Image (cartoon, rainbow, N blue to C red):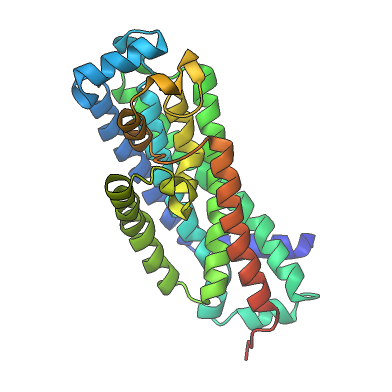
Amino acid sequence: MGNLIKAEFRKTLSLNLWWALAIPAFLAALVFSLSWGASVNDFNDFLGNSDAQELASILGISVDTMPVGMLSLGRAINIGVFFAVLFGVTALAGEYRNKTISTTFLTAPNRASVLSAKMITFSVWGLFYGVVAVAAASIGTAITVDSVGLPTAGQWLGIGATGLLAAVLGTLFGVGLGAVWNSVTGPTVFLCLWMLLIENILVMVAYFSAELDWLGGVLPNGALNGIVGAVGAEAFGAIGSSWGANLGDIDEDLQWAMQFFAGAPGAFSWWSSALIFLAWTMLFFGSGWTANQNRDIT
């Protein structure tokens, strides 16, 4: 297994894709945190004076001391994590595209060991992309958000840790999707359309037309974003009961709006989102594992 893992790292490092995706991941998270941080810095203008005052009253703090940087951090990290998902797609599908899968399977004891080695290797790559996303989001937030609106050290560590977790699970999700699809182009286009457009439209339509406020918490993109975004939503009392907030005191529309701004519409909590997305990951990874046990490589 050790030699297989070493071989997997050599394969990925011999290609330019790992840094070709890491650069836009960093830049996207940085730019988003800069723009989002500048927007939320004046919370009264961002949310509306009455809503901001209502939230501050419930949380027992002043509007000026709200940790608005959590909104910037969560959204930006999720943007960076998206590139980890795209990188994961290439793990197995890329070998089929490059015609190297035959050598990989034939030189390993069995296909299960190859897939296990890829799972371990790309979990490490997921951590790498998580660090890139968290670092970029932190830099942008620190630059644009006033010191009184920055998260506490504990909140910063919490959202950073969930960012790493989301990146690992997101990468493995991409590995599974690519293995099932047996293609790089197809799942890449699908992920861009689904995660950036289609699912967001579905979640908003479901909420405003049918009041299904939970839908975003169970769909793949919403569950992935909720791992990080729920930490920010919790800081504003929109999920759980942090900062002494009582959900019963918050208007449902305001609660959902805060979840949306934090990047976690419909999320239940960060750990619930992690479990839900883990289920999606295992579904696709397990399906990819099964499909490749007997797939023709000639």
Residue 114, x across and y down, in percent = 71, 69
Q: Nearer the viewer, residue 99 or 119?
A: 119
Q: Relative to residue 215, is residue 48 drawn left or right?
A: left
Residue at 46% from the left image edge and 29% from the top image edge: 239
Residue at 52% from the left image edge and 61% from the top image edge: 174
Q: Is residue 116 above or below residue 29?
A: below
Q: Nearer the viewer, residue 93 or 260?
A: 260
Residue 175, x across and y down, in percent = 56, 63
Q: Is residue 81 above or below residue 238?
A: below
Assign the N terminus to one quadrant of the image: bottom right
Q: Relative to residue 112, is residue 97 drawn left or right?
A: left
Q: Is residue 108 above or below residue 25?
A: below
Residue 254, x across and y down, in percent = 31, 28
Residue 99, x across and y down, in percent = 56, 82
Please indicate, yes or no, whether residue 239 appears anywhere in the rendered image: yes
Q: Relative to residue 293, is residue 86 drawn left or right?
A: left
Assign the C terminus to one quadrant of the image: bottom right
Q: Is residue 237 above or below residue 19?
A: above
Q: Quadrant of residue 146?
A: top left
Residue at 53% from the left image edge and 52% from the top image edge: 170
Q: Quadrant of residue 207?
A: top left
Please indicate, yes or no, whether residue 42 appears anywhere in the rendered image: no
Q: Relative to residue 185, is residue 295 drawn left or right?
A: right
Q: How many marks?
A: 0
Residue farthest bottom in this picture = 298
Residue at 61% from the left image edge and 46% from the top image edge: 275
